[in-house]
Image (cartoon, helix red, strand yellow):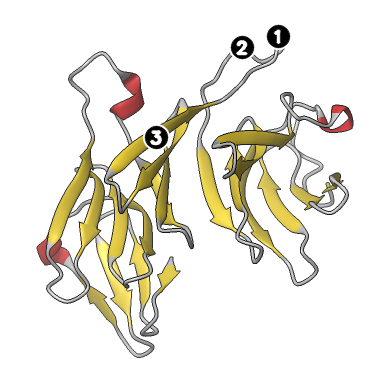
Amino acid sequence: LNKDRRGFLWIGTGRNLCRYDGYSFLRLDSLQLGYCSGVSTDSKGDLYTSVDTRGIARIDRKTMEVSTLVHNNYDDQDTGNDLHEQGMVDSYDQMWVCDYTSVQRYDIARKKLFRYTFQTSKEASDVYQYASCFEDRQRVLWIVSELGLYYYDRKNDKLVCVLGLAAIYPENRIRIRLSRGSQDSEGNLWIGGYEYGLVKYSPSDHSFSVRKAGFEQNN
């Protein structure tokens, strides 16, 4: 889901892209995009989406013309370009997507793709993961991964793990698989986890807690 500057709500679905204006839904079947795993807007108001049939695509806000910026390629030996999913554009006009081995940043102005692989500990040699991204009110970009919680260090251009086996804080080095997160009014992050239920992370002191109520059946 993404709300643009004009108030339209854009929804990526399993078949295409939809727009809601507060009264009715408009299905953009004419675009023939297919499964849209992420949709977002840049500072100009143009739409960017990650679609299985194409890769990273841009939709002009005026003409609704679709252009593919980065193609999915299943035919070569590089598994890093098979998929570009969960796309979102941050406040710096950088589009973030994931595949099953890394997180990628597409610089819209420079038209260049950067790839970030995950560091693994001796206990976690498997880098297979799926991730989603969100930006908090302080403009920090967070990566919520099946390997843990990371943030993007813009100054040093790298991902930093704060919760998970590769965490920079020893007390936060636990095996944890996370799905999606958001920020509350006090600045805390609330993250859905697979085995752990609901996880609360406080960036101010790097502490975390797990709410297991209702998830007792999980092994």
Decide which of tag 3 and tag 2 comes sooner along the chain: 3
Q: Are marks 2 and 1 in contact (CB under 8 Å)?
A: yes
Image quarter where the N terminus lies is bottom left
Q: Nearer the viewer, mark 3 or mark 1?
A: 3
Q: Amino acid at mark 3?
A: Phe
Q: CA distance from mark 2 to mark 1?
A: 6 Å
Q: CA distance from mark 3 to mark 1?
A: 26 Å
Q: Amino acid at mark 2?
A: Ser
Decide which of tag 3 and tag 1 comes sooner along the chain: 3
Please tell me whether residue 35 is drawn above or below residue 100 in the rendered image.
below
The residue nearer to you, when weighing 100 against 219, is 100
Image quarter where the C terminus lies is top right
Q: Nearer the viewer, mark 3 or mark 2?
A: 3
Q: Amino acid at mark 1?
A: Lys
Which residue is identified by label 2?
125
Label 1, residues with CA under 10 Å away: few <14, some 14-19, many ≥20: few
Task: Label 2, secondary structure: give it.
Answer: loop
Q: Are marks 3 and 1 in contact (CB under 8 Å)?
A: no
